[in-house]
Image: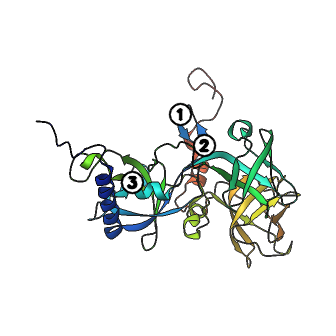
């Protein structure tokens, strides 16, 4: 006996849309709000099929249903050969319809761009402008949110925009929104994306696996799947760039990133450094010998904590704040082995003890030598 000709299992879109709407509504009723952060690739390694330096600059609020309602999955907190490990896991249900509505799909390029307000020339550290950009592309800066159109591409590291920027663009990442009429790949949560659970949890999770063929209750109900099952683990920070504009999220990278403590000479300058501003040594930030971002400033003791460090800070040289114009001479070279925000780091201890463990002499221990 043939199936009912009035019920078209795979093509009856009215019933499928009804089922999708019910699933979306159920998640809205019984779920909770979270912040979804798509990962953008900065330096993709095509040999190992991985991204060496990821960045997260966009946030999208979306609702999700927590499947493991009794508590965290995983092995919990345990001592491994690498020390204390927190292995908390969760599984989430996210509506396919809502995800496709909220999370935009954009063409992201790599590198940063820099430009001032007096001209239309944009420079950057990207060496692929000729292959990744085309005339007519709308370039959107990640931090300041300024949009300009590319009118010409001079080289792999320089292009021209249609009008000067309103505010200076200082080493900002950029994206190129995909036109509406351009064919797009299916939108879904991707492994490597981040999910932030706001207060009171205040937890960052990383998407580890997305189950795309699971349904609720039966096999392909009405011929359509209505949700993504997203499996997440506690995020382990590995120097990814997190610049979303949300202080509660951006503080994550400031807290866990590699930092240095700069001890400045007390009577050598004046001014007050601002948290988040760029500091540098050199004539200008653009051609500085060392630069970093301010994490904290202890004005009483003249101690400057910095992160996102480029180059090497040299003693008896001015450390200048880009926006505050504060400037003090660096008293002593920072201890690069000391990690002030990671109390359990053993860098200094291992550096002191390695000579008792590793023989660095350039002689053969068996054939000859002492």
- Give the residue number, with chain letter if any, for mark 1: 48
Return the residue nearer the eye: 337 or 281. Answer: 281
Q: Secondary structure at mark 1?
A: loop
Which of the marked residues, 1 or 3, is nearer the chain's N terminus?
A: 1
Name which residue lies at 73% across and 59% down: 292
**Residue 345 visible in the current orientation:** yes
Q: In the rendered structure, which disc, 2 or 1, sits on the residue that comes first in sequence?
A: 1
Indicate whether 106 appears above or below 66: above
Residue 286: where, in percent of width, then height?
83, 54
Q: Secondary structure at mark 3?
A: helix
Residue at 14%, 36% in the rendered image:
2
Residue 96's disc is 3
Q: Which numbered disc, 3 or 2, marks the residue that appears first in the sequence? A: 3
Q: Height in image: 183 above or below 195? A: above
Q: Quadrant of residue 279?
A: bottom right
Q: Which numbered disc, 2 or 1, marks the residue closer to the eye?
A: 1
Q: Residues within 10 Å of mark 1 (few under 14, many from 20)?
A: few
Could one spot residue 333 in this view of the protein? no
User: Between marks 1 and 3, how big is the CA–CA gap?
Assistant: 30 Å
Mark 2 packing: few (<14 Cα in 10 Å), some, or many (20+)? few
Q: Quadrant of the N terminus?
A: top left
Q: Position of residue 245 (x, y in %)?
A: 62, 66
Tag on residue 355?
2
- Under tag 2, what secondary structure? helix
Q: Nearer the viewer, residue 59 or 251?
A: 59
């Amino acid at each position: 006996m043939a199936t009912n000709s009035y019920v078209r299992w795979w093509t009856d879109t009215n019933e499928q849309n009804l089922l999708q709407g019910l699933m979306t509504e159920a998640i809205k009723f019984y779920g909770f709000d979270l912040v979804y952060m798509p990962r953008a690739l900065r330096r993709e390694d095509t040999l190992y099929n991985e991204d060496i330096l990821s960045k997260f600059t966009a946030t999208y609020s979306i609702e999700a249903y927590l499947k493991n309602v009794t508590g965290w999955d995983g092995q919990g907190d345990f001592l491994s050969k690498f020390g204390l490990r927190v292995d908390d896991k969760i599984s989430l249900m996210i509506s396919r319809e809502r995800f496709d509505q909220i999370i935009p799909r954009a063409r992201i390029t790599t590198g940063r761009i820099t430009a001032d307000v007096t001209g239309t020339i944009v420079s950057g550290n990207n060496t692929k402008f000729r292959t990744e950009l085309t005339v007519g592309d709308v370039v959107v800066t990640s931090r300041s949110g300024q949009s300009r159109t590319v009118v010409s591409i001079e080289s792999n590291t320089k292009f021209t925009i249609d009008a000067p920027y309103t505010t200076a663009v200082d080493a900002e990442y950029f994206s190129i929104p995909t036109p509406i009429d351009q064919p797009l790949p299916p939108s879904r949560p991707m492994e490597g994306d981040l999910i932030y659970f706001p207060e009171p949890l205040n937890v960052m999770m990383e998407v580890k696996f997305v189950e795309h063929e699971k349904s609720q209750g039966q096999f392909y109900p009405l011929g359509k799947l209505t949700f993504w099952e997203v499996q997440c683990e506690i995020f382990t920070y590995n120097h990814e760039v997190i610049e979303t504009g949300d202080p509660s999220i951006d503080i994550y990278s400031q807290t866990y990133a590699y930092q240095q403590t700069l001890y400045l000479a007390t009577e050598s300058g004046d001014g007050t450094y601002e948290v988040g501003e760029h500091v540098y040594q050199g004539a200008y930030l653009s051609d500085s010998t060392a630069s970093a971002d301010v994490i904290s400033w202890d004005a009483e003791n003249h101690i400057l904590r910095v992160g996102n460090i480029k180059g090497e800070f040299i003693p008896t040289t001015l450390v200048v704040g880009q926006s505050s114009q504060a400037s003090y001479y660096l008293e002593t070279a920072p201890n690069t082995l000391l990690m002030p925000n990671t109390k359990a780091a053993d860098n200094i201890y291992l550096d002191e003890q390695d000579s008792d463990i590793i023989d660095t002499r350039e002689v053969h221990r068996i054939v000859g030598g002492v």
